[in-house]
Amino acid sequence: MRVVQLVRMLAAGALLATGVLHAAPNAAPVRAAGITTTIIDWVPFVRFGGITYLQAPTAGRPLGAADLGQRFSIVRFKVAGVVHDPAYHIKDGDAAFLPIGTPVYRVKNYAPTFRLAARVGARIVLFEADTDPLAHSGGDLLDIGGKVRAIGINSAKDGTTRLATITDPRIVARLVGVVLHGPVDQARTESTSAKYFITFLLRDGTVITRAYWLASGQLARGIMTPPAFRAAVDRALKR
């Protein structure tokens, strides 16, 4: 008998809080005749300089050619369809689905430790930093200082239904500062589903969406916010 173990690699869109190599808790063996193998359902990622970037959800305006800066690097290895070991440790130059040799570009006006982009057919796909072993504060993961025009609070059910929006420039600036100065604990895991999703609406028309847990104050991934951030979220929801 062959056991086909389906290992789901979750993270993207509303699941930005999880890591690239975290198997789904409900992964279950499926029986068939033959030898043992493993099917890995990779999420779209790239890795450079020790930083793992996940493909950002499609929200806000799409990127255009004018958004691309200088070439940052190229993809050196595509794991999808090649790597079948769930214990595989991704390396610099790895990508889930981008073909070997695909150029990866900086995104204008953003640090490459936060955003990178690549052409996929006629589209330009945006990648944002998920994990960085050198990150100590939120500002090491999110390059958004002075770039946020509003903060949305979205439903945990789908990550997109808007429940409230904070537009006061003073409050927005204060909350962004709290996030950028918040300590980072990327080894932390949450035992419950995210309570809300926080959406940073940027001045250039793009957006960032991250899971947020009220109890711990964690903003994915691993940015720990103080009670003042939760208080602002609660006030916005009560209006």
Image (cartoon, grey):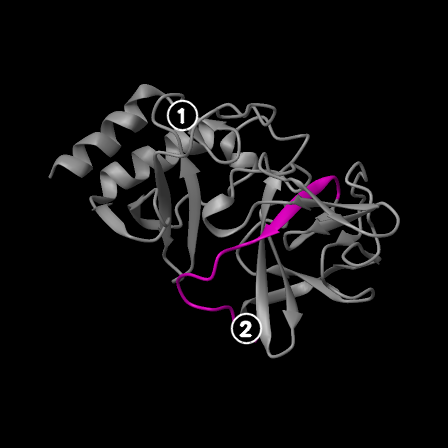
| In this rendering, position of residue 50 left or right of residue 204 | right
The magenta stretch spans residue 52:
yes
Nearer to the camera, 20 or 38:
38
Q: Gap in Å between the C-alphas at discs 1 and 2? A: 34 Å
85 to 45, vertically: above or below: above
From the image, tell me which residue sits under label 2: 66
Nearer to the camera, 161 or 70:
161
6 to 131, vertically: above or below: below
Residue 59 rendering spot, x and y as whole percentages: 41, 61
Residue 155 found in image quarter: top left
Residue 122 found in image quarter: bottom right
Q: Which mark is residue 216?
A: none
Q: Is residue 202 visible?
A: yes
Residue 19 found in image quarter: top right
Q: For the residue marked with disc 1, what is the amino acid?
A: Thr
Q: Residues within 10 Å of mark 2 (few under 14, many from 20)?
A: few
Nearer to the camera, 111 or 94:
94
236 to 109, vertically: above or below: above
| In this rendering, position of residue 215 left or right of residue 25 | left
Residue 139 rendering spot, x and y as whole percentages: 51, 35
20 to 185, vertically: above or below: below
For numbered disc 1, what is the local secondary structure?
loop
Residues at circles 1 and 2 in contact by the CB criterion of under 8 Å: no
What secondary structure characterizes most of the magenta part?
loop
> Which residues are the magenta region?
49-65
Q: For the residue marked with disc 2, what is the amino acid?
A: Ala
Residue 120 rendering spot, x and y as whole percentages: 65, 71
From the image, tell me which residue sits under label 1: 225
Which residue lies at the image location 24% right of the left edge and 37% below the top edge? 171
